[in-house]
Image (spheres, coloured by chain):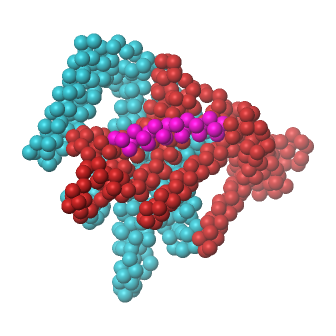
Chain colours: A red, B cyan
Amino acid sequence: MRQVLAVLAVVAAIVGLWYLACIPMNMQGVLVEAERAGAQVSPPEAAARREMGGVSLALRNGFAIPATWAQERPRLPAPHQVAVELWETTIDKKITSKRSLVYHGWVTLSATLLGFAIGTGLGVLLAVGIVHSRVMDMSVMPWAIVSQTIPIIALAPMIIVVLYSVGVQGIIPKAVISAYLSFFSVVVGMVKGLRSPDAMQLDLLRTYNASKGQTFWKLRLPASMPYLFASLKIGIAASLVGAIVGELPTGAVAGLGARLLAGSYYGQTVQIWSALFGAAILAACLVGLLGLIEKMVLKRMGMA
Amino acid sequence: MVLVVLALVLWGAGWWLNTRLAEGPHSGTSAVRLAIPLIFGATVLVMWELVVRGLNVPLVILPAPSLIVVRFADSIPILWADFVQTFVKGALSGYLIGCGAAFLMAVAVDRSEFLRLGLLPVGNFVAALPIVGTAPILVMWFGFDWQSKAAVVVVMVFFPMLVNTVAGLRETTAMQRDLMETYAASYWQAFFKLRLPAAMPFIFNGLKISTTLALIGAIVAEFFGSPTLGMGFRISTSVGQLALDMVWAEIVVAALAGTLFYGAVALIERYVTFWHPSQRR
């Protein structure tokens, strides 16, 4: 209860700060509009205003403060503007509409999920190989670890263009990026998990005369579950980022990344913010869903 | 075709050599531990070269490693300028500001139990979000030059660093804090002599996660607008010109920068947290 209260307090503080920040950020633009509309603005010269900071302008033009939260193309949209835009583009629009955020979200989500499934599957397979083969462990594992320190997302534009030039388009290139971004974190986490049974437990299975396969299914795989879920959560967040970034370089017309890019070309700040929050909500749902599955699985196994 | 067969033969030979090394009598030594991944990497590179030549793969799909090396050597001034723009100006300054701000915030938050309770879940939540998406907004606010890239990096590294530092500052046991109390240590004395050192493994964990995030942020932010230099700019324009050898050269730079940056932080960690079990050899 105390925790919920504390979280709510922090969120409320952030929203409050956001509203406050809107005032100096949007003041210049609001005053220009107010002057055009014939209001008395101080100082009256546009050049003098440009020299001044947002805070001192706000102090001298108190009447204009409410307008900073209602501009059409603000530098920083107010929270309620973003919320309204989110509502309009998700609930009010038809899902098939090109302006519906659900439509764009689905374009990104489908690539994310496909890539995540591929990346996770291959990652788990490689981890099983690494745990069972000393050569693979010693030759592949160091590279998998190094890959975690490299911004491999920089490969994204190239993958899109190369796959395009061999005739592959649509969902696959984005899924490839999502796949390799989740792949390495799953490999590293899963190897750790499959190795987590201690010598005592492995010895016990040896005294049972368990085969390698039996050891794997009855001990290693169950023991790796907490590690697997931890890296799955990191992996799906990385996959989503990959799918979004994969939409940037080709000027894709659909998807959350395309919304971000289009918004930044046309100065539609409210659209950028709503796409950003759409992506954030999507990421939160995906991570939350994995957390839920994790809880259920670990409960069935008696580990949580 | 001969080259492709040769590549397969070489792959087999490399794997056989590694198997011999890994299962041989010296497999535990550090020389072998270093040699095996290097042999593996070299085999992959040579195979890549042979297959690309053997199948005549066009440059716009996959350039051979030798071409990438030539391109790298030829354009060192360009690559260096890009590196300075993106890494030193964008990523590094953002990294320092972001991690510094997060550290100070964590120290402030740590004094209030209520704030800590509220901020940790929020911070954990935000750390999982696709924060690179803020890049177009920040580019709009701070202009095309490195300031906007640094701003993206600040936002990206802030929350992972905050969460780790806050968690680290709680790491001391009640017994240790009681000991400080019996010494009549002030808050700041206990902070600097006990809680900060105890938090160091966590802080360095945050710092290490942030190194990769900083590079990702700086490069991706350049996809949304940049001056006519920088690693992200070079990658996106070279991809447009189908100059894939240049793209790969830039990726080599990014890989080197990322690894060295991470390595440098890990090296500092070794000196600072020499007492921690994970650093014992």
Q: Looking at the image, which residue is at 86% across and 43% down?
A: A35
* Residue A119 colored in magenta in the image: yes
Q: Looking at the image, which residue is at 57% across and 32% down?
A: A247
Q: Left or right: B48 with respect to A67?
A: left
Which quarter of the rendered picture does the C terminus of chain B lie within?
Answer: bottom left
Q: Is residue B9 above or below residue A60?
A: above
Residue found at the very far right of the displayed protein: A38
Q: Looking at the image, which residue is at 40% across and 46% down?
A: A186
Q: Left or right: B27 with respect to A216?
A: left
Q: Is residue B78 visible?
A: no
Q: Looking at the image, which residue is at 8% across and 45% down?
A: B25
Q: Which quadrant of the structure image shows residue A138?
A: top left
Give the camera-side residue of A175 and A278. A175
What secondary structure is the magenta-colored segment mainly? helix
* Residue A114 position in % (x across, y down): 52, 37
* Residue A185 position in % (x across, y down): 40, 46
Q: Is residue B170 visible?
A: yes
- The residue range painted magenta reads A104-126
* Residue B95 position in % (x across, y down): 46, 49
* Residue B117 position in % (x across, y down): 55, 69
* Residue B37 colored in magenta in the image: no
